[in-house]
Image (cartoon, grey):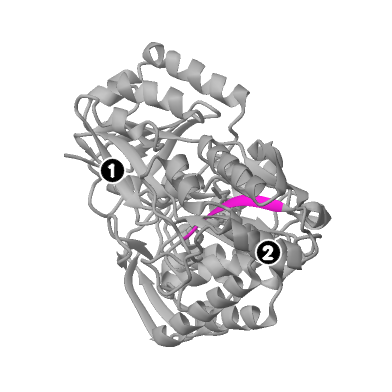
């Protein structure tokens, strides 16, 4: 769930900063069902029968294919297949290798030199890929605005960039204002590192939101809104040819509809939920892939709103909620409990974070000390998904035992993601949130700094020490210093008692046995260029 994949806000963020903007409405479900029912008439089942082609299900339709204004991972996954970057991730790995770059050298903490491979060309007759295109692609993140005049929400990806100096047709230097330890994993290898054609952007204008013109493994052959997007192997791509000649990306918001389509072989790859995974594993010629999640889920408390402005009240809520039961019920035992912000697989994980066991008696004592011996009424904002509704219902019952009357405010995505933003966020009380992590801890911590209050920091918790530590982690090369800073940041969050950490989720996928998908460790970033026919 897209801060930006909620968003992928959280990118990201926050699932897909990749749940963000997902439109789980009745209209979209019916549209997906109707589209799938008509799949046979359109000839698409044949794609599933030919093992050099596949139909892949995504939770929502593509919304913007401009790298600077993408919504979340769903767009990012297409971009990585169509656009080249200077470097890209290896299949299913956090390790990376040169992509468009023949040479890529980090000269020092603030200088990167590159030379592009010879003969790279953009699709659609837009000419050679040049260092001028690299300069345009990167520098525009800090200057481009959308039709509403807003800057890119991904501008922070290139926040350390000073300029790109063009030294030749295919050579250049990336000058940084400060060290940027996460630049390769968060930016250069990802959507914000996409090399676009300046000529195409100048000519197409706003149409770049719906036309991706790159030099990568695939071309964008067709896009029918709310129906399908078709990628075809790029005949002019200079690297190894992909295993699949064609990938059709099918938006289907409803898990049950997607499950039916998978069972009938109308789609060959889909994310699965914990309730359907066991059943899908029994489908002939199919398998389930499970990855430890990197989508952190928590209940946040608005520290500016009474009675949540009292730390003892927040501590009481943290002790009252039955986290273990909530996670077990919502994810059918397939997800692990989380006790802190940073996942175990990332630098800076706080392995000694306290595990708060449910203690109703202590919760009641804290409420009495805070002046609420008889409890109070409060609301919990929840995105309308099955897992989140289950978590919310367990939390509601848990809080009731401590004397807290919790009303559930269940919202569709279109309204949910506006609840904590701007002045409206001042009225938020409790909120069940999920953000998607990426490959560096600074990506995760950025959504909780003071400047994010009213944006993605719905807890409205502001701490100067936390802010300074985030700046240090975001600009320090030394891994030990970065890890220590991240641990201290998590300790500060723990002291605030504004967060009830629940789980890092789990990533479950159903795929036909002959199809080996490329999936990065965070689960939300897929590598269509590495999907293979086995």
x and y, in percent, of residue 489 in the image: 56, 77
* Whole-number angstrom distance, CA of label 2 to CA of label 1: 45 Å
Q: Is residue 55 left or right of residue 167?
A: left
Q: Nearer the viewer, residue 383 or 534?
A: 383
Residue 297 vertical position relative to residue 30 in the rendered view, above or below: below
Q: Are marks 2 and 1 in contact (CB under 8 Å)?
A: no
Indicate yes or no whether the magenta region holds residue 485.
Answer: no
**Dot 1, crowdedness within 10 Å: few (<14), some or many (≥20)?**
some
Indicate yes or no whether the magenta region holds residue 436.
Answer: yes
Residue 170 vertical position relative to residue 89 in the rendered view, above or below: below
Taking the spot 39% from the left edge, 49% from the top edge, the residue there is: 335
Q: Label 2: which residue?
A: 365
x and y, in percent, of residue 502 in the image: 50, 55
Q: Quadrant of residue 367?
A: bottom right
x and y, in percent, of residue 94 in the image: 33, 64
> Which corner quadrant holds the C terminus?
top left
**Magenta region: which residues?**
430-437
Q: Earlier in the sequence, mark 2 or mark 1?
A: 1
What's the magenta bit mostly, secondary-structure-wise? strand
x and y, in percent, of residue 18 in the image: 52, 48
Q: Nearer the viewer, residue 62 or 36?
A: 36
Mark linked to residue 502: none
Q: Label 1: which residue?
A: 289
Which structural element holds mark 2?
A: helix
């Amino acid at each position: 769930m897209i801060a930006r994949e909620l968003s992928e806000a959280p990118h990201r963020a926050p699932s897909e900063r990749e749940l963000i903007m997902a439109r789980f409405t009745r209209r979209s479900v019916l549209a997906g069902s109707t589209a799938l029912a008509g799949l046979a008439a359109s000839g698409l089942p044949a794609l599933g029968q030919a093992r050099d082609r596949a139909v892949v299900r995504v939770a929502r339709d593509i919304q913007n294919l401009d790298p600077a204004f993408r919504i979340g991972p769903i767009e990012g996954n297409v971009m990585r297949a169509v656009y080249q970057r200077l470097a890209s991730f290896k299949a299913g790995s956090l390790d990376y290798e040169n992509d468009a770059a023949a040479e890529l050298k980090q000269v020092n903490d603030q200088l990167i030199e590159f030379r592009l491979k010879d003969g790279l060309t953009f699709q659609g007759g837009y000419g050679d890929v040049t260092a001028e295109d690299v300069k345009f692609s990167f520098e525009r993140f800090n200057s481009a605005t959308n039709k509403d005049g807003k800057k890119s929400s991904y501008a922070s990806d290139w926040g350390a960039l000073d300029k790109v100096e063009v030294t030749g047709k295919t050579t250049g230097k990336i000058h940084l204002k400060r060290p940027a330890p996460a630049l390769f994993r968060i930016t250069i290898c990802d959507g914000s590192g996409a090399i676009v054609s300046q000529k195409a952007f100048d000519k197409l204008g706003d149409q770049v939101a719906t036309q991706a013109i790159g030099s990568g493994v695939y071309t964008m052959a067709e896009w029918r809104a709310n129906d399908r997007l078709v990628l075809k192997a790029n005949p002019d791509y200079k690297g190894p040819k992909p295993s699949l000649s064609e990938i059709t990306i099918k938006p289907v918001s409803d898990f049950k509809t997607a499950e039916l389509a998978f069972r009938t072989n109308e789609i060959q790859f889909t994310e699965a939920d914990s309730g359907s995974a066991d059943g899908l594993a029994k489908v002939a010629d199919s398998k389930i892939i499970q990855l430890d999640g990197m989508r952190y889920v928590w209940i946040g408390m608005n520290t500016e709103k009474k009675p949540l402005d009292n730390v003892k009240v927040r501590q009481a809520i943290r002790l009252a909620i039955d986290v273990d039961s909530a996670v077990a019920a919502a994810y059918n035992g397939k997800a692990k409990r989380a006790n802190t912000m940073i996942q175990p697989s990332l630098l800076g994980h706080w392995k000694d974070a306290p595990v708060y066991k449910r203690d109703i008696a202590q919760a009641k004592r804290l409420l009495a000390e805070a002046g609420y011996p008889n409890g109070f009424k409060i609301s919990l904002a929840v995105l309308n998904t099955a897992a989140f509704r289950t978590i919310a219902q367990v939390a509601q019952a848990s809080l009731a035992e401590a004397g807290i009357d919790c009303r559930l405010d269940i919202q569709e995505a279109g309204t949910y993601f506006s609840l904590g933003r701007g002045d409206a966020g001042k009225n938020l009380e409790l909120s069940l949130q999920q953000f998607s992590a990426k490959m560096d801890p600074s990506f995760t911590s950025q959504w909780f700094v003071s400047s994010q209050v009213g944006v993605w920091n719905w807890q409205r918790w502001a701490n100067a020490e936390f802010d300074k530590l985030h700046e240090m982690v975001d600009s320090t090369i030394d891994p030990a210093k970065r890890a220590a800073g991240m641990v201290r940041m998590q300790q500060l969050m723990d002291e605030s008692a504004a967060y009830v950490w629940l789980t890092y989720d789990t990533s479950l996928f159903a795929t036909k046995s002959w199809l080996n998908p490329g999936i990065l460790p965070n689960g939300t970033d897929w590598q269509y260029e590495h999907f293979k026919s086995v």
